[in-house]
Amino acid sequence: MSNGALVQISDLTKTFDISSPWLERVIERKPRQYLTAVEEVSFDIERGTTYALVGESGSGKSTIARMLVGLMKPTRGSVHVDGVNPDSASAEDVLKFRRQIQMIFQDPYASMNPRWRVSEIVAEPIVTLGLLSGRDAVVRRVGELLEQVGLSARDAGRFPHEFSGGQRQRICIARALASNPEFIVCDEPTSALDVSVQAQVLNLMRDLQRDLKLTYLFITHDLAVVRYMADQIGVLYLGRLVESAARDRLFSAPSHPYTQMLLDAAPRLDGFGRQHQSDSSEIPDPINRPSGCHFHPRCSRAKSNCAVESPQTQTAGASRVACFYPS
Amino acid sequence: MNSQSTSSEAQAEAAAPKGFLRRAWESDIAWSFRHSPVAIVSAVVFLVLVLGAVFAPLLAPYNPFDPSTLNLMDGFTVPMGQGLGSGELYWLGTDDQGRDIFSTILYGLRISLFIGLMAVLFAAVLGVTLGLIAGYFGGWIEAVIMRVADVQITFPSILIAMLIFGIARGLTPPELRDQMAIWVLIVSIGLSDWVYFARTVRSSTIVEAQKEYVHAARLIGRKPGAILRKHLLPNVMGPVLVIATIYLALAIIAEATLSFLGVGAPPTKPSLGTLIRIGQDYLFSGEWWILLFPSLTLLALALSVNLLGDWLRDVLNPKLR
């Protein structure tokens, strides 16, 4: 691989076949239907940095996360983490990939097996990936991990239901760290938590990033979280990456009209009394996406060609934008 | 003063890890059990019947299957009557051969319970396995398993059991038939009931498999077999226990029905159903006790298991609380 980025995603595309069952199609003469959840998304993540993916519900954020960690096969395109592909034919490569990558999930109530003790939950990656041998070594490592995320080693004997949402998310972080990964995909890790607990979990994740040189892909729709966590930000709209820029640049000078709309819609403390033109339009149906640039029906800058051609991604310095008329 | 000491005791208890018995006694299920007279009575009846069946050789006053102890002159003794030949007292009377009805019921209960439990176990193992596989893998595997289940459910289960029983009887050599009969019964009743386990387990598996802990396990490369056994199986077993109790009652009745129809347990190893069939021959000649007592026992057994199952279903279903 030419550049030094840890994670390289190129032309990632995922389409789902959502056709009705065969018999219904034959009887009612329905065509096959496809849903394009992710379309030709490419970006790199530098080692030790955080890349945030933002977008509305249904923009394909979670689908990208699933493909990235190997839970879902991309329809086209590829994912490389440190040069290794999750769909590699060699078992050695697959094991290497799995040791490097981990995931933190959105719902801390569903992300742990309710019948397992915390010790078993945290030890599962260690044992499955064959990182340590011997019961004592595993037990010691589990205790270390729990302390690393701000819990006590004594918590290992308890069940998930004995913990609060924030504590559960800490256990999930401990499980993610158990395999010494370099790269962690965080799928809205704080959206199910109280604001005060969110801050604690985010601080913990930043401290861990600094201490362990972790690389994060952070998926969220909360712009405050993005501003706090991200180095680079990618904005998704209906499966396409419409803008990708460094954090400060994106917040101070957004170039894509959708990014501007998104930033305008976020509540601001300093904007007290400002007149806000709220956008009432909904995200279009992802099955029948608008032609050309998918954003044109909601865009204030749209001209006639926006409905016909889809804009190519233009690179301007470190940032990229897919728009005919960027500001 | 008194309340203070109890509250500090409670705190000390909360701090110290509780023993298993203590936790079991304080659990929701135990509380609900203590407050449900129906559940207590059914449990006592069921327990008495199970103990009677397990310790039949110790409890039964006679061994009804040892011909040397039978006295033909004692035949058709009325309940609480003395045999004409031996002058011994028979609590529940005797049949045509002078066999003690009480002892035959204890031994029959043994066979009925054994067949019922084994049939439910067989159905549960088969149904849970197929349900897990169908729910987790989906696609054509699920389609095949569930369509087979759908087709099978359209046949009455007694019919399926008779079909399997008939085929198996034809295949076994005559000298082994009586020995095989019980196992054939277990398989045929089990095969007709697995569908109910499979359907329930499949739907809970579909729900569980979408949860993130399963994704977390797949992510690190756990094999599907390990995910099914270690992650999904413990989380879908709750409803299985309830279905197993309800189908235990039905399996016992199915066995009795088959035996009553003459395709079940052989006369050399009579179950309650066989006893009822034999007793039925004598009903119109006035020997009512040969029919009545095995029937009452079957009724008590099926009813107590069924009521226990109903109670368990209500307790474990949070929607009904």
Image: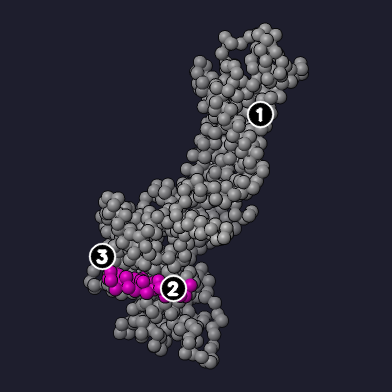
Q: Which residue is disc 1 drawn over?
A: B297
Q: Which residues are magenta?
A: A194-221
Residue for point 64% across, 48% down: B35
Q: Are marks 1 and 2 in contact (CB under 8 Å)?
A: no
Colouring method of the image: one colour
Q: Nearer the viewer, residue A322 or A107?
A: A107
- Mark 1 chain: B
Are the residues flagged by discs 2 and 3 from a single subunit? yes
What's the amino acid at mark 2? Gln
Are the residues flagged by discs 1 and 2 from a single subunit? no
Residue for point 49% across, 84% down: A267
Name the dominant secondary structure of the magenta segment. Answer: helix
Q: Is the N terminus of chain A in the top left, top right, bottom left or bottom right quadrant?
A: bottom left
Mark 3 crowd level (few <14, some 14–19, many ≥20, 10 Å Cα): some
Q: Nearer the viewer, residue B114 or A298?
A: B114
Q: Which residue is disc 2 drawn over?
A: A198
Q: CA distance from mark 1 to mark 3?
A: 72 Å
Q: Is the C terminus of chain A in the top left, top right, bottom left or bottom right quadrant?
A: bottom left
- Mark 3 chain: A
Dot 1 lies on which element?
A: helix
User: Which numbered mark, 2 or 3, is in the foreground of this view?
Assistant: 2
What's the amino acid at mark 1? Thr
Residue A71 position (above or below residue B166): below
Are the residues flagged by discs 1 and 3 from a single subunit? no
Q: Are marks 2 and 3 in contact (CB under 8 Å)?
A: no
Magenta residue check for A294? no
Image location of residue A111, percent across then percent down: 44, 60
Q: Nearer the viewer, residue A229 or A18?
A: A229
Mark 2 crowd level (few <14, some 14–19, many ≥20, 10 Å Cα): some
What's the amino acid at mark 3? Gly
Residue A290 position (above or below residue B5): below
